Amino acid sequence: MQDAKRSTKPWVSPAVVTLVLLIGLNLLNYIDRYILPGEVSLIKSEFHATDQQMGALTTALFVVYMLAAPLTGWLGDRFRRKPLIIAGAVLWSVATLTTVWVHNYWTLYIRHALVGVGEASFGIFAPAVLADFYPERERNRIFSIFYLAIPVGAALGYMAGGKMGSVWGWRAPFFVCAIPGLLIAVLYWVFGREPERGASDHVKSTADRSTALGLFRNPAFLTGTFGLAMLTFAMGGISNWIPEYLRRSVGMTVSHASFVVGLVTVVDGIAGTAVGGWLAQRWLRTNYRALYLLSFWSVALTLPCGALLFFGPRAWSVPMLFVTEFFLFLNTGPLNAAIANSVSSPVRATAISLNLFIIHAFGDTFSPQIIGAISDKTNLRFALGTTLIFLVISGVILRVGARFAPRLDDGVGARV
């Protein structure tokens, strides 16, 4: 009788299956996003584009991403998220496949913009789904695992762009993600689960936390969001231009620069995200403000290292890149968990969509193009150095935000 009961119990929980599949989609998303920075000079050479035009490709993606986000957030709070995630993954994969027909700059511009529509779906729904599986104190740990896909995907994107682009042409690397994206969409349709909304919420729901208008009066949400926006401006600009910076300033080839940036990103991303998540989880035992405070220290430690990266001796460029990225990645899980914890389930998808709109509108939608424009007038070293100003602003906002962190109540929830 006991054996019969055991046989009906799933060997792995729906929460874990869903987490793994969403990590897969997030990984492919970031591979695709960072292929282009890994082969900037190859595309630029074929289309005779300027630095500002190359930066504008990322701007196009995020403008569409931002415009689609409010609608997808509204849908995510009113309809089942599983079919919405599947539809977004299919749309994104098909848009990526269209790269084969790109033969001029403006066609590439349109293609890159269309990819943003798909990203604006699972990028919003995934954190909301995971927050319904896991309680507040566990979300930092789960989000740290989920967002490991960012550095790993970025590293693979850099490497694929530089290596494959140099050998088979710049279009070839984009096909790395398209078919796997369709496959994961099918797997999510079969095995993914839709958790009950708010099943793992334990912090008291108030008007500021549970209504759309309340988000604009919610200081915990606003400081986390705008702190992340300033951080995103810096990170978006640096990540888009750092391979080209190493090529121009250090004298690396396209392939070598992309490989170095990819290697540093994957090592730092895994190490920084894991260490940051671990430190924040331990700190939460004694201080409910830990998610904001850890994020503040992440930015504060990045500043001097970033200054040496851009304005120090050229021989220090790679070592300082390694240290700078490590500190930047410390806040990945904690800050995203802080934003998810600042709101309640009735408006969580809306809050995440508003958060994404703001961080891209004030962050990486325009920073690559702005940095490209400054580079055209001065040089890339000085242009990248302007990101340090936004890191300072981010640190100040996050330090203030710690005052408004919600007190976390313990509760039982799914565990990995």
Image (tube, rainbow, N blue to C red):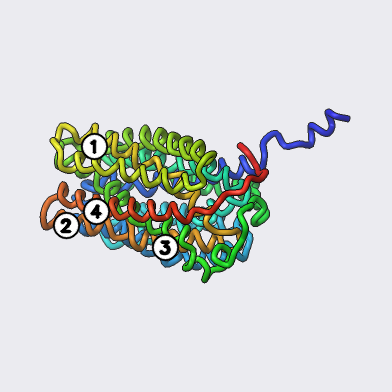
Label 4 crowd (10 A; few <14 / some 14-19 / many >=20): few
Q: Nearer the viewer, mark 1 or mark 3?
A: 3
Residue drawn where x is 60% and y is 45% of the image: 18
Q: CA distance from mark 4 to mark 3?
A: 21 Å
First in sequence: mark 4 or mark 1? 1
- Pointer 4 or 3: first along the chain: 3
Q: Which residue is mark 4?
A: 389
User: Which mark is first along the chain, 2 or 3?
Assistant: 3
Marker disc for residue 386: none
User: In the rendered structure, which disc, 2 or 1, sits on the residue that comes first in sequence?
Assistant: 1
- The residue at the far right in this view is 1
Residue at which label 3 appears: 357
Residue 205 versus residue 262: which sits nearer the camera? 205
Q: Position of residue 82 (x, y in %)?
A: 61, 55
Q: Quadrant of residue 365?
A: bottom left
Determine which residue is flagged by label 2: 374
Q: Is residue 81 above or below residue 186?
A: below
Query: Are dots 4 and 1 in contact, CB under 8 Å?
Result: no
Q: Nearer the viewer, residue 52 or 309?
A: 309
Three-letter residue code for mark 3:
Phe
Residue type (three-letter) at the residue carrying disc 2:
Ile
Near-viewer residue (116 or 296):
296
Report if residue 24 is visible in the image. no
Q: Name the spot of residue 158 as percent of width and height, x first.
A: 32, 41
Amino acid carrying label 4: it is Ile
